[in-house]
Image (tube, rainbow, N blue to C red):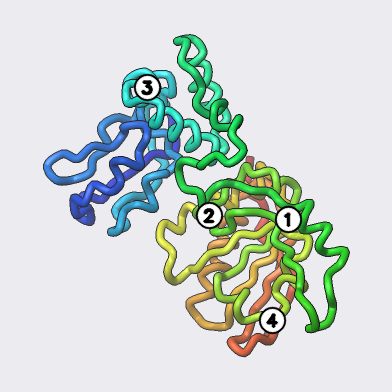
Amino acid sequence: MTKRKIVKIDEAECNGCSLCIPNCYEGALQMIDNKARLISDLFCDGLGNCLGHCPEGAIEIIEREAEPYDEIKVMEENIVPKGVNTIKAHLEHLKDHDADKYLQEALYYLNENNISNPLEASDEKENKIECGCPGAKMMDFSKDSEENSNIDKESESGQRSSHLKQWPVQLHLVSPQAPYFNEADLLFAADCTAFALGDFHKDFMKGKSLAIACPKLDNQQEIYVDKLISMIDNAKINSLTVAIMEVPCCGGLMQIAMEALGKTERKIPVKAVTVGIYGEILSEEWLKTPLPAAC
């Protein structure tokens, strides 16, 4: 067994609603004795598609010793027998999470068993309907953002252009492997900062990739630390700007960033920005970052 990410269910918090079950395409979860339970390590890919469907927050992704996820076994026993719609949903799930290795294994299984790839049929349609969560589909429109920046207006007159380079932006939804994070300057912003700052796009988002979070309301924040570590060490982001509000609870966002920086192998420049509730910049400074972790 190897240490990897896998689902953990808090049975005390689980209310038996079963909303997570249909959203686990791999068939790793089942309702037993009115509780959602992980029935097999082999079937859990650790990508967390079920996370957002639990109203009680009873599901989290942890790292522990587990049997390696087996995509071929999942396809054979849980995906293909359920029909073309489940196959398509599963492939979209892997694609949306940039799980290229698992996706290739799934496509290999389909090819070896003479089963048509439903994604190819969808790609032939101009107006295809996406499966999975349309709001979480990765989109990179940095080229459009760069073109907009060339005609950006400095005054308040007229329509101000957007500097958003990607979708999604919420840190639970973004993939650290997304191409727009590669060697990028990352803005890690508290949710409220964009509403407090009148020139948030022009002064802070321009030329940067974005991830937003709320340290007071968001759950499973340990995932945030893992994703930032991956962005720093694997995507090799150039710099990190952390923008928070002046309210005390917002300081947790800086703590998340500093915890991640303390565990990375790379050391990058970090800027801390504190925004007042009236929209003014209270402080903006480059920080001394922790030394990178020993390899």
Sequence order check, earlier mark of 3 and 1: 3
Residue tagged by mark 2?
A: 225
Sequence order check, earlier mark of 2 and 1: 2
* Residue 239 location (% of width, % of height): 74, 58
Q: CA distance from mark 3 to mark 1?
A: 45 Å
Q: Disc 3 marks which amino acid?
A: Val
Label 4 SS? loop
Residue tagged by mark 4?
A: 198
Sequence order check, earlier mark of 3 and 4: 3
User: Are the residues tagged 4 and 1 within 8 Å (C-beta)?
Assistant: no
Q: Disc 1 marks which amino acid?
A: Ile
The answer to whether one can see residue 222 in this image is yes
Mark 4 vs mark 1, foreground winner is: 4
Sequence order check, earlier mark of 4 and 1: 4
Residue tagged by mark 1?
A: 268
Q: Residue at x 57, y 30 (%)?
A: 100
Residue found at the very far right of the displayed protein: 150
Q: CA distance from mark 3 to mark 2?
A: 35 Å
* Residue 88 location (% of width, % of height): 45, 31
Q: CA distance from mark 2 to mark 1?
A: 15 Å
